[in-house]
Amino acid sequence: MSLVERSARFGTARASRKGTPGAAVLGRFEARIAGWFLPALLLVVWEVLSRVGYLAPNVLPAPSAVASAGWQVLKSGELIHHMAVSTARALAGLAVGGSIGFVLGIANGLSDLTRRYSDTTLQMIRNIPHLALIPLVILWFGIEEEAKLFLVALGVFFPIYINTLHGVRSVDPQLIEMGRAYGMTRWTLFRDVVLPGALPSIFVGLRFALGIMWLTLIVAETIAAESGLAHMAMQAREFLLVDIVVLAIVIYALLGKLADVVTTVLERASLKWHPSFQKTEG
């Protein structure tokens, strides 16, 4: 048997193994857990270094100590309360800032007139670090919920606005002309052509906005809050409860990951027609 024939047979057998149901299930399982391999490895290394004494408990407690502290505040109901407050603030700010950013992005993307009159002002405001406004926001709203809502809404506004504007303006003009040629109304043209074409960019903006949402909320709750995860961490700092501080950081990371997963699921469901989300056959 020649080398070419042996290579061809080997390639065929390899391809057939890849195409078996077991291999497909294994591939999907590997794809699901691959992203958690590095965090799990870091936790193991962290735990080992803590156990052998390389990490002092008052500097960085072991994951097991953090988990134990988390279980205690979970049983007391304190953790659930602070998580609920922080999540409600984050979602409220996202709803307000995201809605305004989406509407203005659509309006400026569709209309040259509104863009000429408003985009320059918005871009100037965008270049002001919104967290630098905290002293002014406290003067305006005090430490009430309005202050945190304003900061989160301002933080998420610009990623959604910029990406919505870019998405609308990036829609193929030939598709729009074709829709007009078929007699589509403005609403139908927007619903069936412009919005679907802009969705990939809008979802990119949403994912950026979610990261800024949690970052802004952490800072806002640290400076001016009487409840929330960051407030819980600051209270723990006063009593040198490092495990609770680390717990709050880990929860923020998990909430951020959860928000990203939910966005990814929505993105895939909304963009089934897009080539990037269609499963390849073979």
Image (cartoon, rainbow, N blue to C red):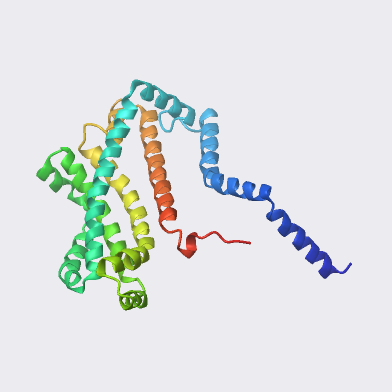
As drawn, 230 above or below 108: above
Judge by depth and name the residue closer to the eye, 99 or 75.
Answer: 99
- Name the residue at 53% across, 44% down: 38
Q: Quadrant of the C terminus?
A: bottom right
Q: How many marks?
A: 0
Residue at 24% from the left image edge and 32% from the top image edge: 227
Q: Position of residue 144 (x, y in %)?
A: 15, 37
**Side (left or right) of 24 relative to 169:** right
Judge whether residue 240 can be spotted in this image.
Answer: no
For the point 56% across and 47% down, the residue is: 34
Q: Nearer the viewer, residue 69 or 176?
A: 176
> Is 119 located above or below residue 19 in the figure?
below
Residue 199: horizontal and vertical position, in percent?
36, 61
Relative image position of residue 178 (x, y in whole percent): 35, 77
Between 257 and 11, the one lying in front of the other is 11
Q: Left or right? Give the position of 87 relative to 225.
A: right
- Left/right placement of residue 124 relative to residue 195 reads left
